Image (cartoon, rainbow, N blue to C red):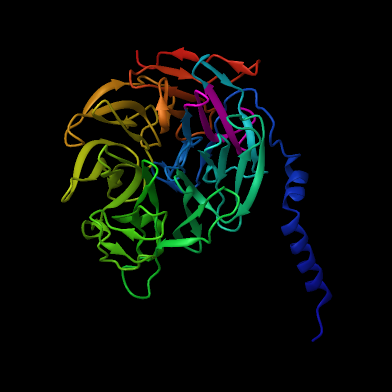
């Protein structure tokens, strides 16, 4: 068959660009600055550009976004350092995403200049933010999220153990929302694929370089012939059990996210069960599966998953916001913070408080026989926007009743958003977050704090490679 020369030329051009993407974007945006230091902690500002009466569906300080990237920080006892990743930028006026890593030295009280692990070369979207893990030899792994096949994900490994001085790229793959765990078998990674809808997968590896095939976890349509779609949060208990809570997107429509499901595995994903050990076949495809915890669709409720942890006995706890719709503003209110937890023989759900946006985000922690929530639960200076004023809540009865222990921030200029805990945390770097104007482009700084309500700002500008963060009073 005769081949059109024009079509042949276009095809060759597409192939060239596909295999030379880094060259192409370097021409547009300049040379990559991977493995370079940035002289300060500058988080990315982002807007989705889905506009409604009360603002964008979500916008603002999203350097520690999304809830489905986890973990973003971890403490290493061997190094006595907290390593943390975030979506950053080179300068105050930039929206160009840099996947960054920093290190807080608990012995000296100093923080390093952050390093660019991955330069996304023109991407301005924090959906591509990184998450972090560490192996038994102390090598730090950074899992950089992609966005379907249009923007691939990457895995990086530190060149030296317990060091952020340099990273090598290990793989390029289809991977969104990475949630890596370090288990006794090696690595376990929950992640998402974009296949027209959002589908949940996991993979395993003994050494981080050779990985299993991608295995699908769930694909639940409400009716035969409909599409499925899911978001998830996950956690591990000790170094053996891994688990996930996930919601369901009716007919694949993400803005109708509803229902709550749970499944766990104690053999590295070989088999899966419900919380009370009923066997589950994967992928889970049954709308009425025994893995379903709550049918929220029947009451027309949306749920936005935030975090999960285990109590000391290994019982799972899920944190989420429950609302009446996806649009920002009063029409979707109330935005109810809830925990759903397993109480040995049954699932219980407890209400905590209300805030003013679906994408307000906080973290659960357990310490000294108390369950804690640190989150922007009070309306901030940008009403009906992402984030707000950060409060530290506690519960002495595993979530049934809650009180405010500390008002971490008050009378702020910008909203504070996406408060993320450190894995195996050590004070003072127990949780960290970013601030910024929730409705209009602004600079975005990073902060960290502890359960005593003390706050430090990571230096926005750094002259030296190591500097002491400034302790500040955000709670007058």
Q: Position of residue 401 (x, y in %)?
A: 17, 33
Vertical placement of residue 174 versus 441, above or below? below
Q: Position of residue 11 (x, y in %)?
A: 76, 68
Q: Position of residue 60 (x, y in %)?
A: 47, 35
Vertical placement of residue 170 versus 222, above or below? above
Vertical placement of residue 31 versus 449, above or below? below
The answer to whether residue 69 shows anywhere in this view is yes
Of all residues, the one furthest to the bottom in this rendering is 1
Residue sitting at 36 percent across and 51 percent down? 244
> Is 298 on the left-hand or right-hand side of 97?
left
Quadrant of res 375: top left
- Seen from the viewer's position, the closer of residues 338 and 117 is 117
Count of marks, rendered view = 0
Rendered-image quadrant of the C terminus: top left
> Is 438 on the left-hand or right-hand side of 401?
right
Q: Does the magenta segment cover residue 90?
A: yes
Residue sitting at 51 percent across and 59 percent down? 194
Magenta span of residues: 77-104
Q: Position of residue 230 (x, y in %)?
A: 39, 57
């Amino acid at each position: 068959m005769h081949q059109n020369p024009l079509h042949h030329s276009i095809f060759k051009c597409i192939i060239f660009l596909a295999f030379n993407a880094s060259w192409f974007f370097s021409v547009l945006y300049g040379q990559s600055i991977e493995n370079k230091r940035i002289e300060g902690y500058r988080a990315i500002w982002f807007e989705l550009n889905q506009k409604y009466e009360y603002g964008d569906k979500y916008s603002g300080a999203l350097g520690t976004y999304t809830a489905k990237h986890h973990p973003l920080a971890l403490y290493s006892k061997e190094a006595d350092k907290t390593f943390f990743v975030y979506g950053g930028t080179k300068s105050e006026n930039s929206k160009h995403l840099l996947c960054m890593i920093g290190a807080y030295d608990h012995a000296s009280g100093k923080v390093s200049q952050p390093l660019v692990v991955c330069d996304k070369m023109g991407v301005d979207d924090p959906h591509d933010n990184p998450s972090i893990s560490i192996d038994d030899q102390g090598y730090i792994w950074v899992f950089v999220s992609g966005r379907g096949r249009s923007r691939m994900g990457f895995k990086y490994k530190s060149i030296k153990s317990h060091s952020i001085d340099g990273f090598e790229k290990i793989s390029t793959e289809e991977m969104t929302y990475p949630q890596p765990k370090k288990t006794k078998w090696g690595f376990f990674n929950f992640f998402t694929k974009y296949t027209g809808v959002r589908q949940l997968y996991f993979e395993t590896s003994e050494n981080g370089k050779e990985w299993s095939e991608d295995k699908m976890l769930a694909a639940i349509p409400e009716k035969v012939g409909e599409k499925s779609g899911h978001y998830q949060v996950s956690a591990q208990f000790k170094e053996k059990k891994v688990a996930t809570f996930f919601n369901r997107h009716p007919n694949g429509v993400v803005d109708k996210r509803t229902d709550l499901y749970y499944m766990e595995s104690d053999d590295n994903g070989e088999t899966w069960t419900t919380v009370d050990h009923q066997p589950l076949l994967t992928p889970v495809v049954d709308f009425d599966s025994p893995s379903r915890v709550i049918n929220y669709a029947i009451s027309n409720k949306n749920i936005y998953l935030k975090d999960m942890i285990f109590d000391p006995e290994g019982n799972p706890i899920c944190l989420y916001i429950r609302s009446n719709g996806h649009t920002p503003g009063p029409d979707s209110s109330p935005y109810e913070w809830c925990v759903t937890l397993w109480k040995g023989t049954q699932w219980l759900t407890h209400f905590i408080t209300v805030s003013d946006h679906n994408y307000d985000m906080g973290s659960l922690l357990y310490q000294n026989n108390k369950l804690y929530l640190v989150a922007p639960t009070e309306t901030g200076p940008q009403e009906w926007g992402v984030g707000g004023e950060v409060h530290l809540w506690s519960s002495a009865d595993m979530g049934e009743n809650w009180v405010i222990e500390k008002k971490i921030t008050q009378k702020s200029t910008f909203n504070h958003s996406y408060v993320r805990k450190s894995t195996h945390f050590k004070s003072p770097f127990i949780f960290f977050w970013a601030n910024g104007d929730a409705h209009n482009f602004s600079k975005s700084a990073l902060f960290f704090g502890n359960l005593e309500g003390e706050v430090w700002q990571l230096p926005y500008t750094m002259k030296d490679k190591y500097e002491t963060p400034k302790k500040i009073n955000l709670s007058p």
